[in-house]
Amino acid sequence: MSTTKRTRAFAVFTVAALLLAACGDDDGDDATTTEADAPAETTAAPEETTAPADTEAPAVTSAVAPPSGEPVKIGILTSITSNFAPWGLQVRDGAQLAVDEINASGGAGGRPLELVIEDDQNSPEEAVPAYERLVEEGVVAVGGIISSSVGGATAPLAESNQIPTFLVKSGDQTILTPDSRFTFRTCLPAAPTVAGPIIEYAQENGLTKIGAIVADYPWGHAFQSSIETAVADADGIELQLEVAPVPEQDFTTYLRAIDEFGPDLLVATGHPPGGGPIIAQSNDLGMDVPVIGAYSPWALVMGGAGDLALGRYADFDCADYQSPEYQELARRFLEMSSDNTFMDDDAVAAYGIVTMIAEAIGEVGDDPAAIGEWLHTQEFDLPGYPFPLSWTEWGEMAAAQPLFSIAGEGPAPEGVNEAGDWYPETLLLPTPLTPYDPSTG
């Protein structure tokens, strides 16, 4: 639901004084109308106090009317297969939950929603024809893009077709241009906003040697440039950086090179699929240092690292795992999802994307260009999000505040984690980020 700006108070854990900045519906967006309870039986009143015969009976609210008419199609372009599937399956199921709940509540503008899902296979070559198929299907918007390479390949199609297109984890800063009007970030901010706070954290904690592993694709390259620039501008910080292939799962060689450097901090932010293995393999080498992740699915990292991640692995999130709104949403998500054991922020973002599109349809109809224009005028308070979502003219998040969380022992709140007892603990909600301006890049 779109709202006016409001301030939220968040408890800050005393684990660390991290100032980080990288990578909702109010609980009423899909409120269902229920029949009023039938009046309770009462003892008959004395005759002299009986109500007149023309007294109206208590009103009974009718059930919400089911949606009707031609379905409004929403495209989901994400990684259902490939090494980014753990992200994409979250996107798919989060979007489906929103569609199911909105349709059960009367639809969008009275019409049913329908998902049209395409697998980009984490490949620009597959993503472009997949996007074109969605256009041919007549979708009013496209959401769920994870990979920066896919985001870079499809953003021009969003602009040329004037179809609102939502990035979830595509952080390459070159995706958005000063002329972008139909491409929107929803979770991971642009890469240049990510590395600076990591360097600030290192300085505040007396850490002078940073080891980093980045993946050999656009996001990894963008993060590499960002952290190298941040280190160059800092005093007393050294960097040892290794570049690995995106599918790599054996990081021993890269970690040995970093280990010889003697790092105080290990940064995996530039290699999203590598978080879990990097923790486990660095531990095997005796590198008992903190590890910062890359907006990776918590179940993926914890499944790969297990107890080794507890109190050691920290990551960025665009989901507030401590909020009652998130926890209520997560319980519904796990009830319907067969492929996921924890609701990560990718699913929260996808749920929010469908929610926003549905609200836009109710306000301006099913014209994609009108939907995109309307979205730029709104601010949304989405369930599970740690900050209100709105955009700059070019589609960057106007005031992103991604949470920074650390792997905690738990126990998790009841019904929200089928993957174990662990649970993310909030370290810090940073001040709103200054949006990256592509005209200055």
Image: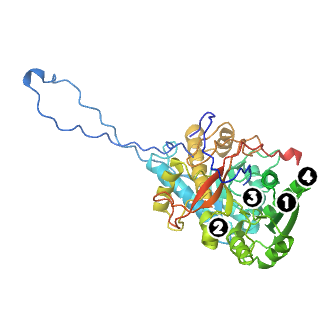
Residue 239: % across, % down: 87, 63
Image height of 315 relative to 373, above or below: below
Image height of 371 relative to 207, above or below: above
Residue 383 lies left or right of residue 255; in this view the side is left
Disc number at residue 80?
Answer: none
Residue 254: % across, % down: 81, 75
Please identify the quarter of the rendering in which residue 149 is found.
bottom right
Q: Amino acid at mark 1?
A: Thr
Helix or strand or loop: what does disc 1 sit on?
Answer: loop
Q: Report the Cα–Cα distance between label 2 and label 4.
A: 31 Å
Q: Residue at x 57, y 43 (%)?
A: 361
Residue 132 lies left or right of residue 1; in this view the side is right
N-terminal label among 4 and 3: 3
Using a 10 Å C-alpha cutoff, classify the residue at mark 3 as few (fewer than 14 neighbours), some (14 to 19) or many (20 or more).
many
Q: 202 or 243, which lies in front?
A: 202
Residue that badge 3 annotates: 151
Q: 170 or 236, which lies in front?
A: 236
Q: Amino acid at mark 4?
A: Asp
Q: Report the Cα–Cα distance between label 3 and label 1.
A: 34 Å
Residue that badge 1 annotates: 208
Quadrant where the image shows the N terminus = top right
| Count of marks placed on residues | 4
Q: Residue at x 75, y 41 (%)?
A: 392
Disc number at residue 233?
Answer: 4
Residue 346: % across, % down: 62, 58
Helix or strand or loop: what does disc 4 sit on?
Answer: loop
N-terminal label among 3 and 1: 3
N-terminal label among 1 and 2: 1
Q: Report the Cα–Cα distance between label 4 and label 3.
A: 29 Å
Q: Nearer the viewer, mark 4 or mark 1?
A: 1
Q: Amino acid at mark 2?
A: Ala
Residue that badge 2 annotates: 309
